[in-house]
Image (cartoon, grey):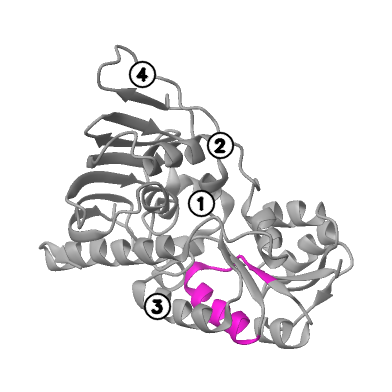
Amino acid sequence: MKEIRIGFIGCGGHSYGHLRILKGIENVKITGIFDPKKENVEKFKKEAGDVDVYKSDRELVEKGNIDGAVICSPHTFHAPQIKLCLKNGVHVLVEKPAVVNYREAMEVKKILKKTKLVFVVGYQRHYNPSFLSAKKILDKKKLGKIVFISGYLAQNWIEIVRNTGRIWRFNPAFSGGGQLTDSGSHFVAMLFFLTGLTPEKVCSFIDYHGMKVDINTAFIVNFKEKVIGSFGILGIDPSFREALLIWGKKGVLKISAYGENSYVHYYGKKEPEAIPEIPSQVNSPAEDFIECIKGKKQPQTPFSVIEKVALLSDKIYLSYKEKKIAKV
């Protein structure tokens, strides 16, 4: 089979997870990299091996002869770099959030529709066997019609950012937002990946905690499917906590990637049941990327999820800014 040539745009922390997986896949070669920081380039080269270093993302994409690009740059750089790749016939694996607003999502969608290229986003939960089983339960309507959803994601985000040195996340010019846009993107994507719901009205409250980006966010959503929900994304916590609860007319399902007692509890049953695990065809965004390039599958995360993450985030910020319910 033809060798698949991959380039990296951004060689910081998250890039290494993708690199290690890609290096273990047959007929995949990391051939070129770009990062504006010399220290990132030198460190990455030690693990990537013999790669060409480019002076810009454009030079890598236009002259690097790559089939696919892994984008691990600051969030607000994603959309321009995604469009650069797609317009040059290069498949894309991008770290979350794929884009930072709905307008960017629509611009990317338009190019994808025209080019038919592969577009994968780094949402790891969507490869988790428990989450895939929860999705199957919901897809088969075993809970009946969904009526209410609630959940939260909380972590010591401020200290994590400081300790890792990725303080660009505190600057909206680079991050596009705070905890909601960053780790919160995983939670919001999980919500839409599992349910397929569509936001209609949003009311939000945000605590910036004295910083330039949002830290704690509470929001209520009225979905078009006549479902209501309440959610919290917190950047202060001694550890990491996450749970999503979905109530249907036949029971309730609780799912968490971090061991918070996932279960499904049907009406008429005295006790909740453990959620069985369904193995994923692929186990990571990087594996998914290569299998999609080979034409063996479609991306695990549909673009409709990316759209809705961007749309809901926009409306959460708008509701807070205007101090009223934001309508979609």
Residue 106, numbered circle:
3
Secondary structure mostly seen in the magenta stretch:
helix
Disc 2 designates what residue? 129
Residue 163 image offset from top left, x and y in percent: 55, 48
Region in magenta:
69-88
Question: Of helix, strand and loop, which one carries label 2?
Answer: helix
Q: CA distance from mark 4 to mark 2?
A: 19 Å
Question: Of helix, strand and loop, which one carries label 3?
Answer: helix
Q: CA distance from mark 4 to mark 1?
A: 40 Å
Q: Point out the tag, 4 or 2, that comes first from the N-terminus.
A: 2
Disc 4 designates what residue? 272
In the image, taking residue 54 as reference, residue 288 lies left or right, namely left
In the image, what residue occupies the spot 45% across and 22% down? 274
Residue 267 image offset from top left, x and y in percent: 25, 21
Q: Tell me if residue 13 can be seen.
A: no
Residue 101 image offset from top left, x and y in percent: 37, 71
Whether 242 is drawn above or below 94: the answer is: above
Counting other residues with Cα less than 10 Å from the Cα at mark 2, is it few (<14), some (14-19), or many (20 or more)?
Answer: some
Query: What amino acid does circle 3 point to?
Result: Met
Query: What amino acid does circle 2 point to?
Result: Pro
Q: Point out the tag, 3 or 4, that comes first from the N-terminus.
A: 3
